[in-house]
């Protein structure tokens, strides 16, 4: 159900991803971070997430995220305020294997190892870039600014 209701509607999914990064925000904050034309659009998506129990709303009108993994989010790790594709870690692994193969091996073994590790590196790098393209393009500074503003309220 969550996969169809949230990931099927791209803007609702983007709002949830932003909420995962900032933990709590007003509709105005969400609208600003995602470049929505009005806060009403953010309210619509936040209320949809609220009906699915993915955010809670306090009496001051601040929405608080409920962290859950479903659908495509199963392919991401939530590390503090960062949403990182799992493929990023495989990219690092294949990069290390490539360097290790060049450094420690010689002859035919090195050529075979480097070719296979470069193949894995290129595949994982392409998939990591694809996953990053899904994420809303907001900077860490914007996220931190929103978090600081909310903590002062």
Image: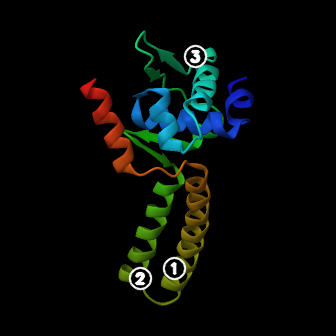
Q: Which residue is mark 2?
A: 102
Q: Which residue is mark 1?
A: 114
Disc 1 from disc 3: Cα separation? 48 Å
The residue closer to the viewer here, 59 or 21, is 59
Q: Which residue is mark 3?
A: 53
Residue 64 occupies which quadrant of the picture?
top left
The residue closer to the viewer here, 101 or 43, is 43
Secondary element type, mark 1:
helix
The residue depicted at 55 percent of the width and 55 percent of the height is: 132
The image quadrant where one finds the C terminus is top left
Q: Are the residues tagged 1 and 2 within 8 Å (C-beta)? A: yes
Secondary element type, mark 2:
helix
Tell me the crowding category of disc 3: few under 14, some 14 to 19, or many 20 or more residues within 10 angstroms, Cα based: some
The residue depicted at 47 percent of the width and 31 percent of the height is: 28
- N-terminal label among 1 and 3: 3
Whether residue 79 is situated above or below residue 2 in the rendered picture: below
Disc 1 from disc 2: Cα separation? 7 Å
Disc 3 from disc 2: Cα separation? 50 Å
- Looking at the image, the residue that sits furthest to the bottom is 107
Q: Are the residues tagged 1 and 3 within 8 Å (C-beta)? A: no
Instruction: Report the number of numbered marks.
Output: 3
């Amino acid at each position: 159900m969550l996969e169809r209701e949230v990931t099927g509607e791209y803007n609702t999914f983007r709002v949830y991803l932003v909420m995962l990064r900032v933990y709590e925000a007003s509709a105005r904050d969400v609208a600003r971070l995602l470049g929505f034309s009005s806060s009403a659009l953010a309210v619509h998506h936040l209320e949809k997430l609220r009906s699915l129990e993915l955010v809670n709303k306090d009496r001051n009108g601040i929405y608080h995220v409920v962290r859950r993994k479903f659908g495509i989010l199963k392919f991401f790790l939530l590390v503090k305020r960062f949403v990182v594709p799992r493929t990023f870690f495989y990219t690092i692994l294949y990069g290390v294997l490539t360097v290790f193969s060049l450094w420690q091996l010689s002859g035919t073994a090195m050529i075979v190892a480097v070719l296979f590790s470069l193949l894995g590196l290129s595949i994982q790098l392409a998939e990591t870039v694809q996953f990053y393209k899904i994420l809303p393009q907001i900077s860490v500074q914007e996220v931190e600014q929103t978090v600081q503003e909310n903590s002062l309220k």
